[in-house]
Amino acid sequence: MSVALMSGCDYFKNKKDAEVKSETPVLEDWSCTAQANIDQLQEHLKTEYLNELNKQLRHSDYEPDQQLMDLIVKNLQFKIKNITTLTEDPDKAKTLECASQLQVIFPKGLQKRAENAFAERPCDECEDRSTYTLNDSLEDGESGLSMDNDQLKGNFSYSITKTDKDGLSLSVPSQNDVIDGVVTVTRHAVLYAAYNKQNKQNEEYYKQSAENDTAQTSLAQKAMDIRKKELDQDNAAVVDRLNQTWDRFSDEQKAQLQQDQADWFEKRDVDCKVLAQKSVYSLSDSEKETYQKHSQYWDNAMQSENQELQFTKCFNQKTTERIVYLNNVFN
């Protein structure tokens, strides 16, 4: 019983619904090498290939090149060669184990297109994409796949079994690496144009995103600069007030307060250095100053500058508190 195939043009017209009906061939010759068996097997493999290709394209986010798809389905050939019968005594056996080499012949130029597509495939996590090639991915399997001159070759095994009614049936691995390899090559080739389109869209998005990030980083820096100016002005004023308050004391009072004042200076500076190191990301939104609410756009230099601003803020607050304390002592 042969496997019915739809034409390439009809096959992918509606890729959401299309599927080639695949049945395991029933054979007539008890032989791994009988041409009739090989012909049916080659048709069966092409059917399996079309089904798997259609399945993967249905789940793809990209639109395939329909014209190229039709060309591939029409011209792609499966050839089984170098067949070896592994069963030692075929006449007494109920199952023939067969080993062979499967050769898949692509339309001219398809290999190069698939290789280029593999290199251009949109992929956010493909860190090794510049060195990991399509051939590398094919060779990672266990079927000895190799691709050259628009041909894919690999090891292929199958078996022929006698049924209870003196018939013969063929058993083929359902997830053969060679079939997967052919599908991989084809899929990348027919999605090449879609990959390029997506890459252009990604480039435009990344460009706009980079421009936005640059603008937002500039805005974050301006907000930080304004806050720094405010804190520096407050710092100059509070230091001047502290000096004026200290100068109101007599020499005798200054002598009495000298050590206490020195201890306070040290504690203020140490406390503020510690408090300034608190990460902005540990603050709730209500705790953040206006300039800190744009911290997602900060670079390392701005992170360091934030610590300096928070130190100055702490310095000003504690110095103001000391002024109040000294005024109370003076009064």
Image (tube, grey):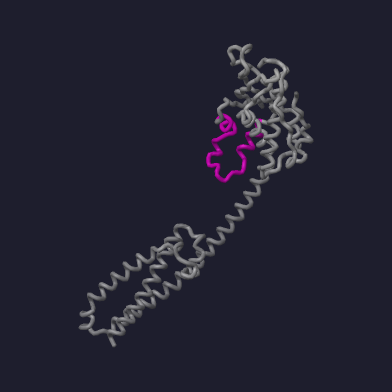
Looking at the rendered structure, the number of numbered marks drawn on it comes to 0
Q: Which residues are magenta?
A: 111-139
Q: Is residue 269 above or below residue 16?
A: below
Q: Quick check: 67 left or right of 96?
A: right
The image shows residue 210 at horizontal and vertical percentages of 57, 55
Magenta residue check for 5: no
Residue in front for this viewpoint, 252 or 62: 62
**Along the viewing direction, whichever of 50 and 252 lies nearer the viewer:** 50
Q: Is residue 228 above or below residue 21?
A: below
The residue sitting at 72% across, 31% down in the picture is: 22
| Quarter of the image where one finds residue 279 | bottom left
Check if residue 125 falls in the magenta segment. yes
Direction from residue 106 to residue 325 in the image, left or right: left
Q: Is residue 110 left or right of residue 281?
A: right
Quadrant assignment for the N terminus: top right
* Residue at image coords 29%, 88%: 331
Q: Which residue is at the front of the view, 266 or 147?
A: 147
Return the x and y of residue 250 as percentages of the image width and height. 23, 85
Residue 36 pos. (x, y %) = 73, 18
Residue that protrudes farthest toward the front in the picture: 164
Does residue 107 appear in the picture of this structure? Answer: no
Horizontal side, residue 124 vs residue 51: left or right: left
User: Between 44 and 236, which is closer to the camera in this rendering?
Assistant: 44
| Picture coordinates of residue 277, whole percent (x, y) | 38, 63
Say which residue appears at 29% left-offset and 81% top-offset: 246
Residue 173 visible, this angle: yes
The picture quadrant where one finds residue 94 is: top right
Q: Look at the picture and state if 136 lies above or below 92.
A: below
Above or below, 172 relative to 203:
above
